[in-house]
Image: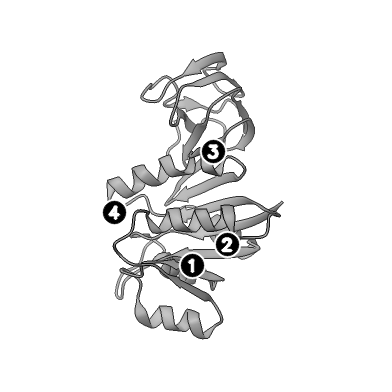
């Protein structure tokens, strides 16, 4: 499995402005993911985050309305492809990046990790999370880091690792999920339905360090806030 990392825009603790210093609990994990990626895409100002993680992207894509032009030129000089779109467009920069992974890259790239922000505009965060569950990307294994929050998209079965006692939420995306099952969680799913808008799966808990989440039909988001433990 070859992995693509997509850096999305928005304010992020790893991108400090002059005179400021930020910490993020999973900083080392995020940098390791970026370093191991076979291909890196920066969605607009996601370029700032990619560089903060020590990784020059292979592609910078978007309308370039929020990217630092000096850093953009540095990326161009370093050999990154720059793919610009008009600001008057019908898709977010993150969507453009995921469509590129889905349609234009080597088909061996079947795993995508999105690294972005959980701060800034709520509409961008919500639409981005729903975007990850789109049927267009059903052929990709998708994970995401929004700040310290980890999210895994589940369309069949996923094994998730965390500390015992860690809180975890399971949320249905886009349509009612059928046949939801789990092992290793305090409140088990036993082949039931889970509908979007239901809080049935919120604030569950790891019994040990490994849990499995599966679904017969539909799409789930498994969400772990790494700063929050019970």
Of callouts 1 and 3, which one flags the residue occurring earlier in the amino acid sequence? 1
Mark 1: few/some/many CA within 10 Å (<14, 14-19, 20+): many
Between the C-alphas of marks 4 and 3, the distance is 22 Å
**Disc 1, disc 3: CB below 8 Å?**
no
Disc 2/disc 3 C-alpha distance (Å) = 19 Å
Q: Which residue is mark 4?
A: 120
The answer to whether the residues at label 1 and label 4 have Cβ atoms under 8 Å apart is no
Query: For mark 3, what is the residue?
Result: 153
Closer to the N terminus: mark 2 or mark 4? 2
Q: Residue at x 66, y 63 (%)?
A: 38
Q: Nearer the viewer, residue 171 or 33?
A: 171
Marks 1 and 2 in Cβ contact (< 8 Å) = yes
Q: Are marks 2 and 3 in contact (CB under 8 Å)?
A: no
Q: Earlier in the sequence, mark 1 or mark 2?
A: 2
Q: CA distance from mark 1 to mark 3?
A: 22 Å
Residue depth check, mark 1 versus mark 3: number of the one nearer the observer: 3
Give the alpha-carbon distance from disc 1 to disc 4, as whole Å.
Answer: 18 Å
The spot of residue 140 in percent (x, y) is: 61, 45
| Helix, strand or loop for disc 2 | helix
Between 103 and 15, the one lying in front of the other is: 103
Q: Which mark is residue 34?
A: 2
Q: Can residue 79 be seen at all in this image of the molecule?
A: yes
Q: Vertically, is 62 above or below 102?
A: below
Give coordinates of residue 22: x percent, y percent.
37, 62
SS at mark 1? Answer: helix
Residue at the spot 43% in from the left edge and 55% down from the top edge = 94
Between label 4 and label 3, give the one nearer the viewer. Answer: 3
What residue is at 50 percent from the left and 48 percent from the top? 144
Q: Residues within 10 Å of mark 4 (few under 14, many from 20)?
A: few
The residue drawn where x is 59% and y is 32% is 155
Q: Is 115 positioned to the left or the right of 9 in the image?
A: right
């Amino acid at each position: 499995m070859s992995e693509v990392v997509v850096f999305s825009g928005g304010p992020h603790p790893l991108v400090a402005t002059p005179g400021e210093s930020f910490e993020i609990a999973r900083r080392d994990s995020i940098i390791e993911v970026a370093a191991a990626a076979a291909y890196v895409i920066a969605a607009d100002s996601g370029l700032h985050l990619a560089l903060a993680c020590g990784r020059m992207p292979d592609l910078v894509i978007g309308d370039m309305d929020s990217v630092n032009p000096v850093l953009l030129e540095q990326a161009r000089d370093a050999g990154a492809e720059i793919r610009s779109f008009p600001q008057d467009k019908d898709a977010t920069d993150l969507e453009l990046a995921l469509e590129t992974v889905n349609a234009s890259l080597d088909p061996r790239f079947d795993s995508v990790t999105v690294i972005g922000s959980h701060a800034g505009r709520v509409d961008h965060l919500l639409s981005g999370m729903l975007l990850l569950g789109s049927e267009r990307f059903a052929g990709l294994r998708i994970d995401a880091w929004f700040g310290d929050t980890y999210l895994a998209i589940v369309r069949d079965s996923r094994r998730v690792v965390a500390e015992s006692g860690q809180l975890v939420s399971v949320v249905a995306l886009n349509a009612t999920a059928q046949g939801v099952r789990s092992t290793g969680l305090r409140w088990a799913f036993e082949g039931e339905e889970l509908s979007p808008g239901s809080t049935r799966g919120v604030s569950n808990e790891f019994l040990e360090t490994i849990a499995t989440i599966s679904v017969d039909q539909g799409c789930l988001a498994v969400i772990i806030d790494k700063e929050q433990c019970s």
